[in-house]
């Protein structure tokens, strides 16, 4: 929720207040220029850490989030009733621009909870649930995850099989979810279930908030071919959820899910148009270091990768400007998500062509075999936030107005 009425503080006063807070609580970020052969040569798409390092990062993130929220910068555009300041989006942008210049603990663990779950709670939960969860989410006291994909249905949410059966004032959930980021450290989850199996696919779905530590919830880590475990599979065995934790009306979960999905694709697709400027620099430097920068085929590949990521970045900026103006994200965010994965895949193949055998065998040479982690991580990105195939269907049917895909 963003209130565009005249705020009680000017933007200049707000910036001064924010700068004073940041100066008092964080150090200025050092500008580090990339130099070939120095520092870490890791090139990964997923933040893969040991359990100890991950826990330390989460604790640091929570400490900063609480401090930020208590100072009035945790939910700048949010309703005052839930700890926000009800300031226009321009104030949020001003704070983020200032904060980018400071060495603040990574806030990655809050990405899904604040980017996808919280907006859905605000839009569809009853007041009691909003009061219970929104403030703790934005203060960093709790973390949220999203429970949509399933082993059989994949990204086709209309085909999900996890069941929710009503039992008085409660619902009993049974089923399995997969590819759930952050489930192992999350406190609550937003889950979509099938409540009326006899209704058409997009009907008969209902959304809930579930306690991730409730009896019957089991989280298992999924090991990826990168060597890390960034995703989880989650099993629900007769998990009880109060009806008050239902999001939206019974059997109208598809409408609720769209709120989450559009915010998800805005977060994933709009968060980056590809590898980013620094990583593209790494690709260029890689070609130079291996003496391939004069090869016409390599140069053509580098130029194509640069053009692709630049076009996607400008397109995303347009879409994000629409969101900041208060408009809901639309199907165009599916274009952003598809562009992201296609650009990653293309660039990974350009890098593999430059490296040759070095990408399959670790010789100890700096900046070479390290790219294997990025290459192996691309398939995961093509699943996260909706598979490429689902994105193409959405673009074809909802953006281009083409006939629906025939069902076998």
Image (tube, rainbow, N blue to C red):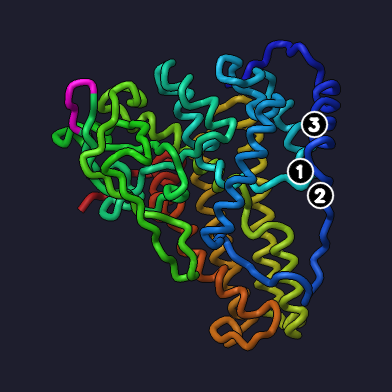
* 1 or 3: mark nearer the eye: 3
Q: Earlier in the sequence, mark 1 or mark 2?
A: 2
- Label 1, label 3: how many angstroms apart (C-alpha)? 14 Å
Q: Residues within 10 Å of mark 1 (few under 14, many from 20)?
A: few
Residue 293 vertical placement versus 193 (above, below): below
Decide if residue 385 is in sight here.
no
Identified at 60% across, 67% down, the residue is 347
On whether residue 232 falls in the magenta region, the answer is no
* 1 or 2: mark nearer the eye: 2
Disc 1 to disc 2: CB gap under 8 Å: yes
Mark 3, secondary structure of its residue: helix
Mark 1, secondary structure of its residue: loop
State the image quarter where residue 90 is shown.
top right
Q: Earlier in the sequence, mark 3 or mark 2?
A: 3
| Mark number, residue 36 | none
Residue for badge 3? 21
Front-lying residue, 336 or 71: 71
Q: Residues within 10 Å of mark 2 (few under 14, many from 20)?
A: few
Residue 56 vertical placement versus 260 (above, below): below
Residue for badge 1? 100
Residue for badge 2? 29
The segment highlighted magenta reads 165-169
What main secondary structure does the magenta stretch of the protein show?
Answer: strand
Q: Earlier in the sequence, mark 1 or mark 3?
A: 3
């Amino acid at each position: 929720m963003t209130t565009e009425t005249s705020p009680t503080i000017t933007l200049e006063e707000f910036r001064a207040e924010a700068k004073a807070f940041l100066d008092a609580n964080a150090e200025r970020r050092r500008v580090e220029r990339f130099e070939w052969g120095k520092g870490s040569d890791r090139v990964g798409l997923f933040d893969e850490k040991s359990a100890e390092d991950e826990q330390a990062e989460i604790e640091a993130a929570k400490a900063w989030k609480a401090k930020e929220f208590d100072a009035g910068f945790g939910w700048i555009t949010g309703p005052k009733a839930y700890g926000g300041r009800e300031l226009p989006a321009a104030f949020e942008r001003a704070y983020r621009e200032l904060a980018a210049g400071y060495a603040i603990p990574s806030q990655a663990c809050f990405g899904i909870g604040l980017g996808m779950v919280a907006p859905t709670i605000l839009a569809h939960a009853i007041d009691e649930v909003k009061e219970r969860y929104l403030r703790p989410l934005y203060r960093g006291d709790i973390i949220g995850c999203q429970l949509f994909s399933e082993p059989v249905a994949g990204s086709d949410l209309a085909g999900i099989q996890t069941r929710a059966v009503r039992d008085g004032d409660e619902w009993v959930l049974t089923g399995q979810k997969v590819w759930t980021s952050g489930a192992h450290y999350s406190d609550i989850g937003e889950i979509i279930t099938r409540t009326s199996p006899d209704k058409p696919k997009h009907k008969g779905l209902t959304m809930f908030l579930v306690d991730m530590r409730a009896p019957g919830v089991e989280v298992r880590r999924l090991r990826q071919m990168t060597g890390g475990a960034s995703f989880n599979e989650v099993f629900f065995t007769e998990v009880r959820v109060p009806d008050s934790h239902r999001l939206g009306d019974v059997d109208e979960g598809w409408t609720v899910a769209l709120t989450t999905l559009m915010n998800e694709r805005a977060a994933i697709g709009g968060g980056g148009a590809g590898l980013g400027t620094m990583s593209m620099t790494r690709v260029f430097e890689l070609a130079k270091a291996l003496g391939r920068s004069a090869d016409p085929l390599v140069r053509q590949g580098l130029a194509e990768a640069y053009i692709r990521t630049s076009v996607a970045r400008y397109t995303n900026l347009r879409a994000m400007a629409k969101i900041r103006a208060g408009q809901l994200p639309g199907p165009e965010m599916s274009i952003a998500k598809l562009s992201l994965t296609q650009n990653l895949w293309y660039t990974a193949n350009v890098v593999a062509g430059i490296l040759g055998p070095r990408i399959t065998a670790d010789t100890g040479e700096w900046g070479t075999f390290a790219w294997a982690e990025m290459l192996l991580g691309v398939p995961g990105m093509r699943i996260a936030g909706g598979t490429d195939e689902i994105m193409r269907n959405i673009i074809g049917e909802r953006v281009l107005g083409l006939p629906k895909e025939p069902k076998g």
